[in-house]
Image (cartoon, helix red, strand yellow):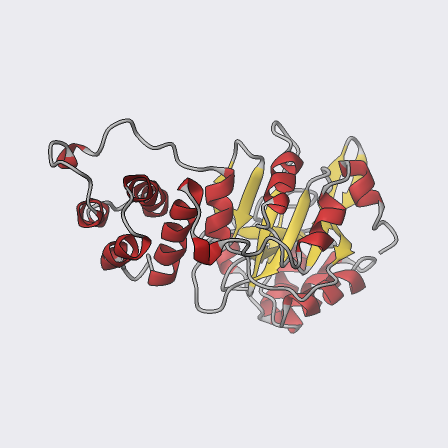
């Protein structure tokens, strides 16, 4: 099941009852689970919620016989083969940050767009094979990333907004081939960590910061390693440490849940953030961005109205 195949399923399910739509997704190999009617909360509260998603048709039929009005939840990441950028409009208008990310060439590659009932936007991408991309939130930007450990409420699910029943529905299909999203670079752009004013306690008084000093410090950290790695990469870039020296040092902290590919991307993002890396100049900045820009540069109501015929 490709993301393009999924878009066809969503389009076909627009006017179908939720139980039938859930069954068709499961039949096509997309794991599903029931979500509270007209809501976004998993119904399987005695279990593990979205982690109980399945393609077992008997189980799917049982769930939707019990809850015929249940919305359809789909786990994101490796479980389904898709990841989603979720643009919110409550509190912070996520379209502002989405426009900035588009101009920076960071959101190209989406397969289709889904309008949420509240006026937000879901950008669907294929998950990167063999790579874990954990879900994250950039609250100040109004954008979340739904990857491994997350889920999305899928079309044709419904919400009640201001007394009106409004569906999730596809509003735009890409004209360019879909490709995986670099979620780490997007997060670093939307929500860059603020470098602390002083080095970590165990590194003070040791003179000029070296890559192995920072790598040894990072190796002892058990939480938020990606953000700390991004900060360390920025520090090394500011110190004038060659990119390859920094990368070689940081790769020594590779662990099963913190792989070399993620480390390499984060180090490259840190160096590009400070003074640019010649090897990365212009990457993702031209091809593929135009189709997204036509949608996200307009006002929200114009952007979504253009695809109402789908």
Residue 201 % position (x, y):
16, 32
Q: Quadrant location of the C terminus?
A: bottom right
Which x, y percent locates residue 226?
Answer: 36, 47
Residue 184 vertical placement versus 207 (above, below): below
Q: Nearer the viewer, residue 53 or 190?
A: 190
Q: Residue furthest left?
A: 205
Residue drawn at x 58%, y 69% is 55
> Is any part of residue 46 visible from this angle?
no
The foreground one among 182 and 301 is 182
Q: Choose top left, top right, bottom left or bottom right for residue 244.
A: bottom left
Image-quadrant location for residue 56 = bottom right
Residue drawn at the location 68% of the way across and 62% of the way down: 22
Residue 36 on image: x %, y %: 63, 46
Which residue is nearer to you in this view: 59 or 139?
139
151 lies above or below 298 = below
Q: Up-down: is 18 above or below 220?
A: below
**Residue at point 57%, 50% (across, down):** 106
Question: Seen in the image, is 163 located left or right of residue 142?
Answer: right
Name the residue: 50% across, 42% down.
189
Q: Is residue 108 visible?
A: yes
Would you identify the image quadrant in which residue 4 lies? Answer: bottom right
How far across and down, in percent of the image, does residue 145 sit?
Answer: 53, 47
**For residue 79, side relative to residue 208 (left or right):** right
Q: Quadrant of the N terminus?
A: bottom right
């Amino acid at each position: 099941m490709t993301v393009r195949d999924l878009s066809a399923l969503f389009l076909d399910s627009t006017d179908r009852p939720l139980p039938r739509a859930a069954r068709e997704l499961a039949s096509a190999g997309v794991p599903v689970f029931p979500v509270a009617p007209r809501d976004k909360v998993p119904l399987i509260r005695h279990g593990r919620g979205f982690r109980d998603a399945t393609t077992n048709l008997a189980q799917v039929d049982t769930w939707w016989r019990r809850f015929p009005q249940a919305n359809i939840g789909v786990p994101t990441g490796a479980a389904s083969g898709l990841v989603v950028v979720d643009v919110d409009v409550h509190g912070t208008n996520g379209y502002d940050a989405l426009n900035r990310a588009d101009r920076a060439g960071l959101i190209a590659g989406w397969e289709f767009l889904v309008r949420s009932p509240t006026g937000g936007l879901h950008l669907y991408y294929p998950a990167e094979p063999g790579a874990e991309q954990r879900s994250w939130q950039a609250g100040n930007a109004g954008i979340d990333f739904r990857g491994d450990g997350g889920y999305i409420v899928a079309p044709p699910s419904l919400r009640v907004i201001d007394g009106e029943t409004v569906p999730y529905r596809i509003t735009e299909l890409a004209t360019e081939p879909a490709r995986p999203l670099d979620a780490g670079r997007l997060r670093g752009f939307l929500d860059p960590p603020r470098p602390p004013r002083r080095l970590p306690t165990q590194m003070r008084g040791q003179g000029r910061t070296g890559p192995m000093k920072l790598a040894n410090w990072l190796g002892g950290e058990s939480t938020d390693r990606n953000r700390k790695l991004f900060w360390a990469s920025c520090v090394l870039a500011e110190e004038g440490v060659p990119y390859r020296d920094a990368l070689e040092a940081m790769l020594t902290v590779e662990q099963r849940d913190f792989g070399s590919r993620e480390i390499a991307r984060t180090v490259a993002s840190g160096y590009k953030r400070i003074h640019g890396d010649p090897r990365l100049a212009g990457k993702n900045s031209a091809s593929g961005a135009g189709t997204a820009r036509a949608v996200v540069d307009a006002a929200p109501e114009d952007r979504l109205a253009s695809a109402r015929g789908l």
